[in-house]
Image: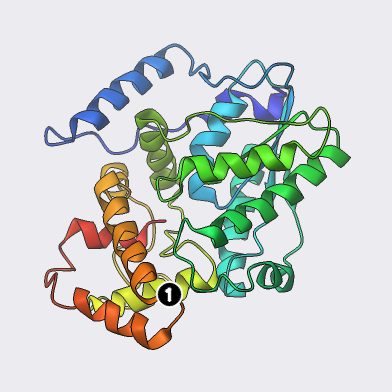
């Protein structure tokens, strides 16, 4: 790596000391990370063959932290550039919050940040007819395709060897769905590869939240698009949970900023993710794009949970 991208500039504290009640996966991951730090934090990532320059599509700063650290501490790479293209994010205020935070993070580390155009009109045009698809459905595939296609074009025009995306780090995303979009986009250009790796390991997840807590990153409450915002607020209303707040120092639910790696990681537990998508798919199958039927379907959740403020499963819904 270049001097500004050496792993020394990407060293963070361990974050909160793990209590005795910490889950076993976190304790084991923390021990492995501690050993890596003692050895100089050498990267364990494996870029594809002959890859030296990587264009990393970033959806937000929280998802990029651990992935940037892994890539930039690798002695196999010459350059990592962060590429921000997310026309799906709505409203514009939320888009600017996520973009500017990601930009500041890259500037702090001396990593080049490419600010691509915000063209929501093209995004809405491409998503036409899929307005009521559930999360992880066809609309999400098209959304990943659109962003990765733009990333691949820039990579091709600027001499990059591979593309990757921080969408692959989140357990709220279907990794296979994300990776398939990456492969399709890279295949458009001869010599360009898509970097596929397990970015959702226990070490990567804990590290992501250590960095997010250390940086006090903004904790977004929904995926990003207007349809995600609509569906999340409908679900919250049915469960008597405060609606999502855009910006400001107070979130609609839970904390506005990342602060405790273990608490934040618990909000992205597999149980939290699975429950949300199970209910989302149930509503989509029952009601489709019929607004009245969707409202009726949402009513079944109204009395399922009365302790939403203390229930970790519900509190996880403010950490995407």
> Callout 1 environment at 10 Å: few (<14), some (14 to 19), or many (20+)?
some
Q: Residue at 39% across / 32% down in the picture?
A: 13
- Rendering coords of residue 99 (x, y %): 62, 59
Quadrant the N terminus occupies:
top right
Tell me if residue 176 comes above or below residue 290 in the rendering.
above
Task: Residue 251: tell me if it is visible.
Answer: no
- Rendering coords of residue 71 (x, y %): 60, 28
Tell me the residue that label 1 is attached to. Answer: 288
Nearest to the observer: residue 258 or residue 92? 92
Instruction: Report the label total.
Output: 1
Quadrant in which residue 278 is drawn: bottom left
Look at the image and name its color scheme. rainbow
Q: Looking at this rendering, what residue extends furthest in the right direction? A: 157
Task: Residue 118: tell me if it is visible.
Answer: yes
The secondary element bearing badge 1 is classed as loop
Q: Looking at this rendering, what residue extends furthest in the bottom direction? A: 292
- Using residue 181 as the reference point, say whether residue 37 is left or right of it: left
- Rendering coords of residue 72 (x, y %): 61, 27
Quadrant the C terminus occupies:
bottom left
Nearest to the observer: residue 81 or residue 167? 167
Tell me if residue 302 comes above or below residue 153 in the rendering.
below
Q: Residue at 28% across / 78% down in the picture?
A: 297
- Rendering coords of residue 95 (x, y %): 60, 66
Q: Residue at 84% across / 38% down in the picture?
A: 156
């Amino acid at each position: 790596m270049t001097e500004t991208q050496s792993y020394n500039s990407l060293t963070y504290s361990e974050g909160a000391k793990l209590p005795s009640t910490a889950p076993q996966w976190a304790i084991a991951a923390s021990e492995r990370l501690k050993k890596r730090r003692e050895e100089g934090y050498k990267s364990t990532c494996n870029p594809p063959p002959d890859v030296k320059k990587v264009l990393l599509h970033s959806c937000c700063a929280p998802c990029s932290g651990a992935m940037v650290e892994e890539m930039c501490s690798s002695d196999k790479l010459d350059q990592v550039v962060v590429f921000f293209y997310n026309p799906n994010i709505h409203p514009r205020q939320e888009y600017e919050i996520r973009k500017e935070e990601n930009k500041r993070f890259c500037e702090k580390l001396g990593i080049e940040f490419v600010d691509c155009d915000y063209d929501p009109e093209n995004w809405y045009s491409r998503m036409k007819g899929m307005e009521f698809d559930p999360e992880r459905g066809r609309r999400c595939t098209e959304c990943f395709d659109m962003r990765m296609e733009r990333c691949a074009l820039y990579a091709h025009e600027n001499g990059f060897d591979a593309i990757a995306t921080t969408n692959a780090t989140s357990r709220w995303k279907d990794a296979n769905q994300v990776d398939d979009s990456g492969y399709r986009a890279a295949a458009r250009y001869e010599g360009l590869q898509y970097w596929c790796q397990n970015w959702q390991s226990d070490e990567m997840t804990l590290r992501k939240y250590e960095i997010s807590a250390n940086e006090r990153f903004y904790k977004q409450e929904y995926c990003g698009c207007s349809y995600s915002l609509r569906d999340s607020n409908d679900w919250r209303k049915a469960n008597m949970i405060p609606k999502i707040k855009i910006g400001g120092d107070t979130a609609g639910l839970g904390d506005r900023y990342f602060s405790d790696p273990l608490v934040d990681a618990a909000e992205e537990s597999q149980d939290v993710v699975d429950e949300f998508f199970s209910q989302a798919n149930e509503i989509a199958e029952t009601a489709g794009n019929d607004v009245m039927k969707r409202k009726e379907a949402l009513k079944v959740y109204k009395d399922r949970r009365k302790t939403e403020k203390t229930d970790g499963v519900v509190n996880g819904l403010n950490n995407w």
